[in-house]
Amino acid sequence: WGNTGANKLVFGAGTRVSVQPNIKDPDPAVYQLRSPTSSNTSVCLFTDFDSKVNVSQDPNSTVISSNSTALDMRAMDSKSNGALHWSDSPDFMCDNTFETGAFYPSSGFPCDATLIEKSFETDMNLNFQNLSVIGLRILLLKVAGFNLLMTLRLWSS
């Protein structure tokens, strides 16, 4: 009874491994974002849909689509399914772009970085702890420098 090779998986030459995500009740949503400077430019973002959903669109459409459906959200260290369609047509709407129940236009949910900055609050204790760590590091460097200086003086005399 040894531990050698106990946790290894060995597959034969004809074995195919397929990993299927097990997402329970995905909650898809469509967000429409319009440019504040140009009323013609509009983007539809379809997020959090099931992997089996087909997000293709009519090939005769004037809408430009992204080919990738995996969104890498590095800020949250996660990945999600997502599709992106955009158009320069003034009458472009996201309602019928994707077949989904939830639709959120940009007027209800503005995408503005200044709104996030206004609501950002920092933690006082965290700032104090960071300042304390910096102070202790400076103190440690001073003590180490003083000890080195005194050691060199003792050796030289």
Image (tube, helix red, strand yellow):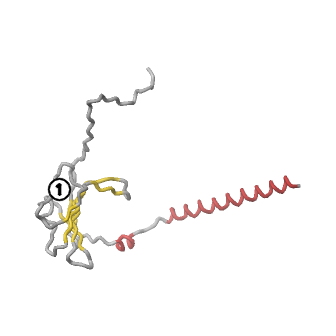
User: Total marks drawn?
Assistant: 1
Q: Name the residue under label 1.
A: 55
Q: Residue at x 62, y 63 (%)?
A: 135
Residue 146, placed above or below residue 110:
above
- As drawn, the residue found furthest toward the right would be 157
The crowding category of the residue bearing disc 1, from other C-alpha atoms within 10 Å (few below 14, some 14 to 19, many at least 20), is: some
Q: Which residue is drawn at 17% across and 56% down?
A: 55
Q: Residue at x 17, y 61 (%)?
A: 102
Which of the pair 153/18 is nearer the observer?
A: 18
Figure quadrant of residue 34: bottom left
Amino acid at the residue labelled 1: Val
Residue 38, placed above or below residue 71:
below
Left or right placement of residue 101 versus residue 137 in this view: left
Residue 114, placed above or below residue 137:
below
Left or right placement of residue 125 versus residue 48 in this view: right
Q: Is mark 1 on a helix, strand or loop?
A: loop
Query: Residue 152: x, y in percent?
Result: 81, 55
Q: Residue at x 45, y 22 (%)?
A: 2
